[in-house]
Image (spheres, rainbow, N blue to C red):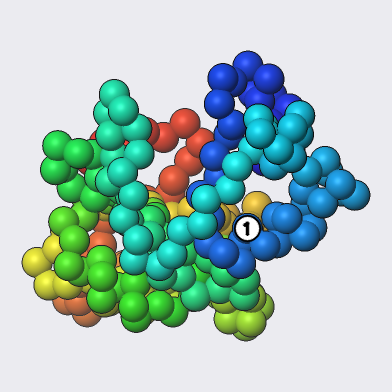
Amino acid sequence: LPMMLDAVAYRRRSPLRVHALRGTLGALRAHVFNNVIWPDFTMLPSPETPLLTFREIGMGQCLLRGSRAPKHIEVLPAVHTVPACGYAVRSADGRANWVFGGDSERNPAFWQRVNQLDVGALVIETAFSHNQRELARISRHLSPGVLVEELGHIGQGSHYPVYITHTKPDCTHAVMAEIEALSAQRKLLGLTVWDIRRLKAGDVLVVP
């Protein structure tokens, strides 16, 4: 956010509006925009005309954002070491949702809501490889084995691509190889196999 403000704030006619959970906004105020690490741009250049404003969001809240191509954004639950959430985003014309799981480990509430939505694509993290599965558990991230367990919560009859993101740089190859091996094992056993892909920089998701 500080870098973004440096790049765009003085070219904007209105403040940059940041939507986040209450705990996240508290952390930003206390540890980033605190006039020690970074200036408090919610007060600069003046309290009446700041460069930055904060808007609190809550779990389950639905937002409508954008004017030319409005988007419905629903805040989804995440299970992490700090306040975190995911999102379900769809265009106002009623297309399927693009779902982002956020930083999260096992998350029954997330799947309960996702299975009620028309999903066109899912982006989900798998930060660590199998060898680091205990670190993943402690830090509330997924590893390949747990990812497969979580995907098992996808409702019957639901078919959509699953994109893997947030792999640690030194784990990316191992994570994807392990996911492919687990998928191959499931196929041999006649179990459900999902369309799992690695999300790479520059990829464009087309949601039907």
Residue furthest out toward the left: 157
Q: Residue furthest front?
A: 48
Question: In the displayed structure, does residue 68 sit left or right of residue 172?
Answer: left
Percent x, y of residue 18: 55, 45
The residue located at (58%, 34%) in the rendering is 16
Instruction: Write down the quadrant of residue 95 in the picture.
Output: top left
| Residue 92 located left or right of residue 200 | left
Residue 21: x %, y % from top left: 53, 62
Residue 74 sits above or below residue 15 on the image: below
Looking at the rendered structure, the secondary structure element under dot 1 is helix
Give the x, y percent position of residue 162: 32, 56
Answer above or below: position of 52 versus 9.
below
Q: Which residue is mark 1?
A: 25
Q: Can you tell which quarter of the image residue 111 is in?
A: bottom left
Taking depth in this image into account, of 59 and 129 the one nearest to the observer is: 59
Q: Residue at x 34, y 78 (%)?
A: 109
Q: How many marks?
A: 1
What quarter of the picture does the C terminus occupy? top left
**Does residue 173 show up?**
no
Find residue 99 and report its horizontal and vertical position in percent: 33, 54
Left or right: where 108 falls relative to 131: left
Residue 95 seen in this snapshot: yes
Q: Residue at x 34, y 80 (%)?
A: 108
Q: Residue furthest right?
A: 36
Check the picture and name the quadrant holding the N terminus. Answer: top right
User: Can you say whether 95 is above or below 143 in the image?
Assistant: above
Amino acid carrying mark 1 in the image? Leu
Q: Residue at x 21, y 55 (%)?
A: 119
The crowd level at tag 1 (other Cα within 10 Å; few <14, some 14-19, many 20+) is some
Give 72 or 180, whichever is nearer the viewer: 72
The residue sitting at the top extreme is 11
Viewer-nearest residue: 2 or 154 = 2
